[in-house]
Amino acid sequence: MEVCIIGAGMAGICTARHSLANGFKTTVFEQTGAIGGTWVYSENIDKDEYGLEVHSSMYKSLRTNLPKEIMGFPDFPFPEQNDSYLPAEQVLQFVKDYADNFKVNEHIKFHHYVVRARPYDGKWEIVVKDLPNDKYLTYRFDYLFICNGHYEEPLCPDIQGIENFKGEWMHSHYYREPSKFKNESVLVIGAGPSGKDIAEEISHVAKKVFVSHRNKKIEGAFSDKVVQKPDYIVIREGNIVEFSDGSKEQISKILYCTGYKFTFPFLSMDSGVTIVDNYVKPLYKQCISINSPKLAFIGLCFRSLISHMLDIQVRFVFTYFTGKKALPSRKEMLADMERDLKERELKGLPIRKGHMLWEDLQEAYYDDLAKTAGIENLKPVIMKLYKENQKSNKHSYLNFRNKKYRFLNDEEFIEIH
């Protein structure tokens, strides 16, 4: 049996490692010349040498917002070192080491751009462009894994009066370092992890920085140089932004930190997959296509314990792709998906957050995958440290990365002082 994997980021490498372990002939198609996906930093924010969009959204100063102790894989942890919160280049090296350890690299076709993926005669037909040789190739596989990440196509919500704005605006996807914001009055829209980090970094060179977000005022998230504002309402003439509390500020640059759209331009219309309000459907347990059950998505979930989420999703899918267990009926899988959406709705989460894992949703999701497929769940210490990380992140955003941790066993961890 042959497996195709689209993307050689962390999700693709993890999938390839388990595909090989299960005895599948495995091929990974990667558009760039390197593994690592979003962890690969590039100064280039435009087109690559083949005229394709640069996928990287990595900014130069990024440090992880999860400690390394819970960013490794169950069978391949981060090496011991003093710091818990690491710069991006160390995470990239870890992904490379993981790929080397499980001999994944020899199965990757670099600079192969996937043009089309379509179901064909019980298999998946994949058309790729061999970029260095400028030619198209067609392959057929038994199973397809889509692991192309979700930090590629920026999501920029509409702002009333944006046509009045005469300054520069951009999405955080194109942000690398703060120099272009020197002496500017900057409006950062969104206060997720990147919004908080970038606003704080910009504040050291900008004249003024305002962060507009939907939450109540976030305590401990910013220094005194950053002013929090409620949702924007409208941009008036003269680059005046009026907020919902009636306050007005003159802005020279706007930076959207508003997330990304899921996009799979290579998937054919008959793939059985649609995207509604940034929700990919219909999927069983956020992974397996209900309409095309030889297709799986790995890593759609966000706000997650990324590496452990990827690993348990991949192990879940291979339980069915290897035939160890049979999938429920289509009717049962659809009912399961609708039940999940209903539970989210009752928590106040709209469909556009249908792939979000957060707080109790995350632990319940991993428990469900493990129980449903009969596979090993995360070690208890992983979720315990994750909860501690989230509490620390929420109450002291400026300082939480100074903390250091160490696991004592599968149940307990300590903070190192």
Image (cartoon, grey):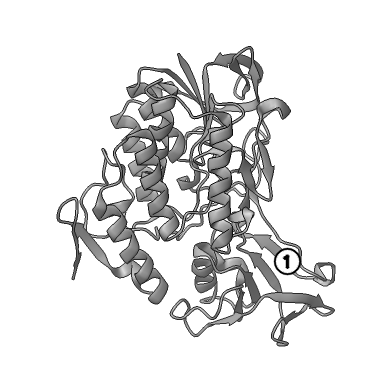
Indicate left or right for 93 with 38 as reference.
left
Mark 1 residue type: Glu
* 317 over 124 or under it: above or below: below
> Circle 1 sits in a helix, a strand or a loop, which is it?
strand
Give coordinates of residue 360: x percent, y percent: 41, 59
Give coordinates of residue 287: x percent, y percent: 50, 37
Indicate left or right for 17 with 250 as reference.
left
Q: Note whether residue 397 is visible.
A: no
Q: Nearer the viewer, residue 408 or 151?
A: 408
* 55 over 182 or under it: above or below: above
Q: Residues within 10 Å of mark 1 (few under 14, many from 20)?
A: few
Indicate left or right for 302 with 316 as reference.
right
Q: Quadrant of the C terminus?
A: bottom left
Residue 167 lies in quadrant: bottom right
Residue 86 lies in quadrant: bottom left
Residue at position x 55%, y 79% in the image: 216
Residue hosting label 1: 168
Toward the left, the furthest residue is 408
Q: How many numbered marks does the figure carry?
A: 1
Residue at position x 40%, y 22% in the image: 106
Give coordinates of residue 3: x percent, y percent: 48, 20
Residue at position x 26%, y 38% in the image: 75
Q: Nearer the viewer, residue 108 or 156?
A: 156
Q: Quadrant of the N terminus?
A: top left
Give coordinates of residue 302: x percent, y percent: 50, 52
Q: Note whether residue 301 is visible.
A: yes
